[in-house]
Image (cartoon, grey):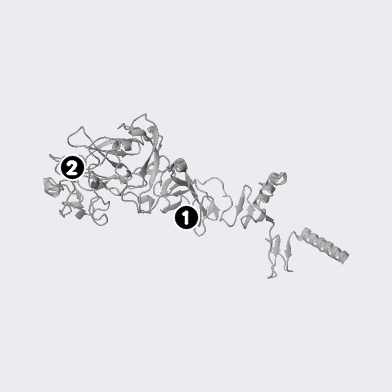
Amino acid sequence: MKTYTLIRTTLIACLLSLTISLQAQITVGGDKTPENFSSLELISNKRAGLRMPLLSTKERNAMTKTKEFLDNATGLAKGLTIYNTSNDCLEFWSGTKWISQCEGEMPPYIPATPSASATVTACAVSSAPASVLASTGFYMFTYQTMNLYANSTGDTPTSYQWVVDGKLIKGANSATFAYTPPADIALEADYPSDLGLSNYKKTVTITCQMVINNNEVQPVSDFKILVVKATKGTLTPIYVNALEGGVAGADIVRVAFAHVNLGAENDTDPCNCLGDLYQWGREKDGNGTTTGHFRRNLTDADVWPNGIGTSDATTSTIAQAADLDATTGQVLSSVTDKYGKFIKSLSTSPAYYDWRNSRKHDLWGDGSQDYNPTWAIPSNNPCPTGWKVPSQKQWSAIYQGGTTNGAPGASTSGSTWTGLGKFSSGNTSGYRVAEALYLPAAGYRSHFNGSLDTVGRFGYYWSSTRNSVSSYGDDSYSLAFLSSNVLPGHLTNRAYGFSVRCIPE
């Protein structure tokens, strides 16, 4: 029996060798002639399949370190296929790495060099050069969704393949791609977690392979997004380095700011996460949704007295003593014509560009210029419980200290200021401070006619600090910035509508 088996095996081997040598093609499992494009065809018997070599990750890695493999890694070894028993996935060698079919990975791109005619863009960096994209990318939170766009300056692509961190996204085969961080995204802490000061974040790399006339034109230059952990509907602290006490040259400490502007807590679109615009010293009046002087989407009826775009020259445009609470200085809720409305200012005495007819310097803070003032009227604080409007020195602490203006790169606080976007009207732009704090160029609301202005070009953020030098005119401090300059001691009329970025109390 053993002799017969040996003879039969030898005969079959000879026949196979003869067949292969004659036609370099073979069919196993049937008597059909192989197709011209097939070297080997397997015909199923409906009871069994092809079983790949079984290797663990450790065994696979050991194989790739052998001299025979290394000598042929970029050549003959390409296409080598195994079944990995460590992750239960089919894998093949691409010439540079093992590609797992379970994880949705795809082989290296051809060509390997990004095409000059293909780009991926989003709201904030639609015209930024590739060098900026590679170094800064853009910014979003874990609960947000960013819409990306694949662009080609040549012919219209016939297909698209989106890839996130080297993984092919199945079903993402159009020119647009909505990226939402997965629940299990691998975030990393940028500060020691045992101090309780960690920001959790990850830089995600996204690209798209477009095909034009069946010829690959991709990949595009990497599009990078910094994803930062935060909670929707509430304020999350983001920690940055700062100069202690807001004093130039002081020791570096860590401070926290809210992750978004006040009013943007529920915005899921990172391209439109701007928040509200407050007049200095005013509380969160109205119901905050359909009424409230601070809302970004004000209508004519929300601006006292004649609507957006008009100006007035009578003292009736500002809040009078009878309209104001004697203790808090706020517009009384019983005064329905001014309560919850944006109040335009006058350039005449006694108000001088205020929203009320008399000055009150402790509406926010306590009227001092302390780093961390005690609020004289806590109820005026527009921030939620546990948060407050920062002082001028708290703003300057994350730049140079004091009130010195300068270029973004001149920060001495230990927190770098990196510009994102192109700082032009209608575009999403702003600064990433340190590694995780983003300040958008949210513009302002005019104290003169109530209209929105400089959105995408400038950022203006109130402080709680009054200016004690001037008795009228510019009498409260704000942080202001544009593409080329940061002004931590910007003096501003109180009737302007500016952004508020809260800090922990």
**Which image quarter: residue 233?**
bottom left
Residue type indicated by callout 1: Ala
User: Residue at 16% across / 44% down in the picture?
Assistant: 356
Q: Earlier in the sequence, mark 1 or mark 2?
A: 1
Rendered view: 7 above or below 215: below
Q: Could you tell whether 395 is left or right of 186 in the image?
A: left
Q: Is residue 411 above or below residue 107?
A: above
**Position of 78 compared to 387: left or right?**
right
- Label 1 – label 2 distance at C-alpha: 47 Å
The residue that label 2 is drawn on is: 354
Q: Nearer the viewer, residue 311 or 129?
A: 311
Residue position for label 1: 183
Query: Height in image: 330 above or below 42?
Result: above
Q: Are marks 1 and 2 in contact (CB under 8 Å)?
A: no
| Disc ID at residue 126 | none
**Mark 2 residue element:** loop
Label 1: which secondary element: loop
Q: Is residue 325 visible?
A: yes
Q: Amino acid at mark 2?
A: Asp
Left or right: 186 in relation to 22: left
Would you call the spot at circle 2 few (<14 residues within 10 Å), some (14-19), or many (20 or more)? many
Quadrant where the N terminus is found in the figure: bottom right
The percent position of residue 34, horizontal first and vertical second, equals 71, 64
* Residue 500 on image: x %, y %: 29, 45
**Residue at x 74%, y 62% (from the top left corner):** 26
Quadrant of the rendering where the C terminus is positioned: top left
